[in-house]
Image (spheres, rainbow, N blue to C red):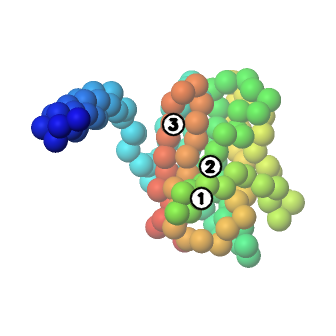
Amino acid sequence: MKTRTLLLLAVGCGLVILVAGGIKLLFIADDKVPPHLAVGQSATVGEMVVRVASVNRTGDQTIVDITISGVDDTDGATTFFYGVGAAKELRPVVPEDRAVPECGATRAAAVTTCALAFDTSVAAGVLRYERGGEKAFWDIVSAP
């Protein structure tokens, strides 16, 4: 092949990649990330009303007290994740303090108050709750 042909093929491939990238950019431009909420604020996520009441650190665990209601579900409070940076997300574990009610089932007619425990003593983090394809985020960096 001639050099001119190879250069034209390279430019053509570059244009195809540029157009594909532009199309992908248009698709992800519609993805809206909800704003981060503060401790004490509520969010409605897939018919579930969730409020992060407080955050406490005890030993090697971070305890997040929540209130949750809106749907009868045996595991409605299990899709919480705690991001502590570097793409590390933690799932809730059993609290060290057995007096703290562990989260699990939720009720439509009653508000459930419970605590999520995460194995981390890291102060900075973002709590995420997912339900029905929706998400809510709480910034708990400034919590004591």
Q: Are marks 1 and 3 in contact (CB under 8 Å)?
A: no
* Position above or below: 55 against 21: below
Q: N-terminal of the two: label 2 or label 1?
A: 2
| Quadrant of the image occupied by residue 82 | bottom right
* Residue at x-position 72% and y-position 64%: 119
Q: Which mark is residue 88?
A: 1
- Relative side of 76 to 88, left or right: right
Q: Label 2 is placed on what type of residue?
A: Phe
Q: Which mark is residue 81?
A: 2
- Whole-Å distance between the Cαs marked 2 and 1? 10 Å
Residue farthest along the right direction in this orientation: 98
Q: Secondary structure at mark 3?
A: strand
Foreground pick, 138 / 70: 138
Image coordinates for residue 39, horizontal then vertical, percent: 50, 55
The Cα–Cα distance between marks 2 and 3, rounded to whole angstroms, is: 11 Å
The three-letter amino acid code for the residue at tag 1 is: Lys
Q: Is residue 58 visible?
A: yes
Q: Which mark is residue 135?
A: 3
Q: Nearer the viewer, mark 1 or mark 3?
A: 1
Query: In the image, what residue occupies the spot 52% across and 63% down?
Result: 85
- Circle 1: element type: loop
